[in-house]
Image: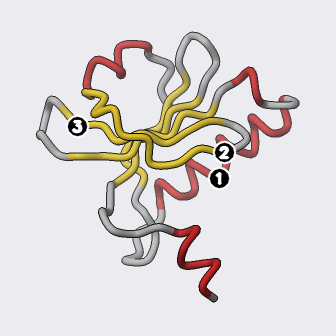
Amino acid sequence: MREEEEQFQDYEDLDVLLGEGMQGEVIKVRSYKDNAEYAMKVVESSKMKNKILAGQIIQETLLLKKLNHENIIKVKDFYRVISGDFISIMEYRDGYDLHKIVTKS
């Protein structure tokens, strides 16, 4: 996990909200380095209820970063910015709406 504010400079915000929840949101971004599109998940520290939750987020994301399976979204990078927010850069897969898939089941 990195603790760098400069990481935001590596990505262009494409002004597309992919989803939002109780702890933050997921937006579509483009990397300046490889011009690829990614999903950026921002977990806001102000919405975390305690330090245990922060530890769980770190543990789960670092575990996901190690996994490599076709049915699991790949985590490219993970870091914490000066504000305390957690940022996950994940592969972007167009066309998948988990909410619609789950509600159809």
Reading the image, the residue beneath label 2 is: 21
Q: Nearer the viewer, mark 3 or mark 1?
A: 3
Name the outermost residue toward the bottom: 105
Q: Are marks 2 and 3 in contact (CB under 8 Å)?
A: no
- Left-right relation of 96 to 19: left
Mark 3 or 1, nearer chain start: 3
Q: CA distance from mark 2 to mark 1?
A: 17 Å
The circle on residue 47 is: none
Secondary structure category for the residue under label 2: loop
Mark 2 or 1, nearer chain start: 2
Q: Position of residue 99 (x, y in %)?
A: 58, 68
> Label 2 neighbourhood size at 10 Å, few (<14), some (14-19), many (20+)?
few
Q: CA distance from mark 2 to mark 3?
A: 22 Å
Under mark 3, the amino acid is Arg
Q: Nearer the viewer, mark 2 or mark 1?
A: 2
Q: Position of residue 54 (x, y in %)?
A: 75, 34
The circle on residue 30 is: 3
Q: Nearer the viewer, mark 2 or mark 3?
A: 2
- Left-right relation of 55 to 50: left
Residue drawn 50% across the image and 40% down it = 41
Reading the image, the residue beneath label 1 is: 60
Mark 2 or 3, nearer chain start: 2
**Rendered image quadrant of residue 85:** top right
Residue drawn 70% across the image and 24% down it = 45
Secondary structure category for the residue under label 3: strand
Under mark 2, the amino acid is Gly
- Left-right relation of 87 to 48: left
Number of marks: 3
Q: Position of residue 7 (x, y in %)?
A: 35, 21
> Label 1 neighbourhood size at 10 Å, few (<14), some (14-19), many (20+)?
few
**Rendered image quadrant of residue 48:** top right
Q: CA distance from mark 3 to mark 1?
A: 24 Å
